Amino acid sequence: MPRKSTTPKPPAKPRKIVPTKHISEVPQIRLEPVVSSQVQAIGHDPATNTLAIRFPGWDDKPGSLYHYANFNADQFAEFCAAESVGSFFIKQIKANEALFPYTKIDETPQA
């Protein structure tokens, strides 16, 4: 019969718990449609420096809505003026997740 080890097991690693925001804590940001295959609509809340992006869904339906933190009014103006909104998003926002952390707000809007 094999001997049992008397060495104690290391403690389990604690799970990272990501707090969710209550719907009343999420800024309501007006979205404006943009011409892009990557992004459906964008908006900005200067009071909270929050960028809102709605991505395209399936069958021309709206897709998921995300909020990106730390995005100021000057950056939003630059985003709006970009030759390609999709390229700007990929190169300037998505590539800088540490600078612009995001929160998924919803999957699809309610009809």
Image (cartoon, helix red, strand yellow):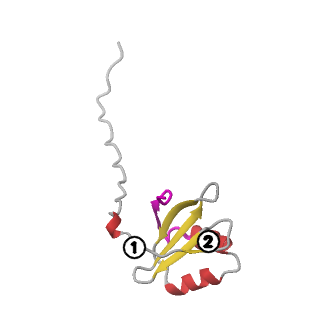
Query: Counting other residues with Cα less than 10 Å from the Cα at mark 2, is it few (<14), some (14-19), or many (20 or more)?
Result: some
**Residue placed most toward the observer, 6 or 47:** 47
- Residue 75 vs 23, above or below: the answer is below
Q: Amino acid at mark 2?
A: Phe
Q: CA distance from mark 2 to mark 1?
A: 21 Å
Magenta stretch, overall SS: loop
Q: Which mark is residue 83?
A: none
Q: Which residue is mark 1?
A: 27
List the single residue furthest toward the right: 83
Left or right, residue 14 beside residue 35: left
The residue identified by callout 2 is: 89
- Of residues 34 and 89, the one nearer the viewer is 34
Classify mark 1: residues with Cα within 10 Å, few (<14), some (14-19) or many (20+): some
Q: Position of residue 81 (x, y in %)?
A: 64, 84
**In terms of secondary structure, where does tag 1 sit?**
loop
Element marked by disc 2: helix
The quadrant in which residue 38 appears is: bottom right
Name the amino acid, label 1: Pro
Please state if 52 lies on the left or on the right of 90 as rendered.
Answer: left
Residue numbers of the magenta segment: 96-111
Discs 2, 1 touching: Cβ within 8 Å: no
State which quarter of the image contains the N terminus.
top left
Determine if the magenta segment contains residue 67: no
- Residue 96 lies, with reference to residue 77, above or below; the image says above
- Residue 101 lies, in percent from the top left, at 47, 68
Q: Residue at x 52, y 76 (%)?
A: 43
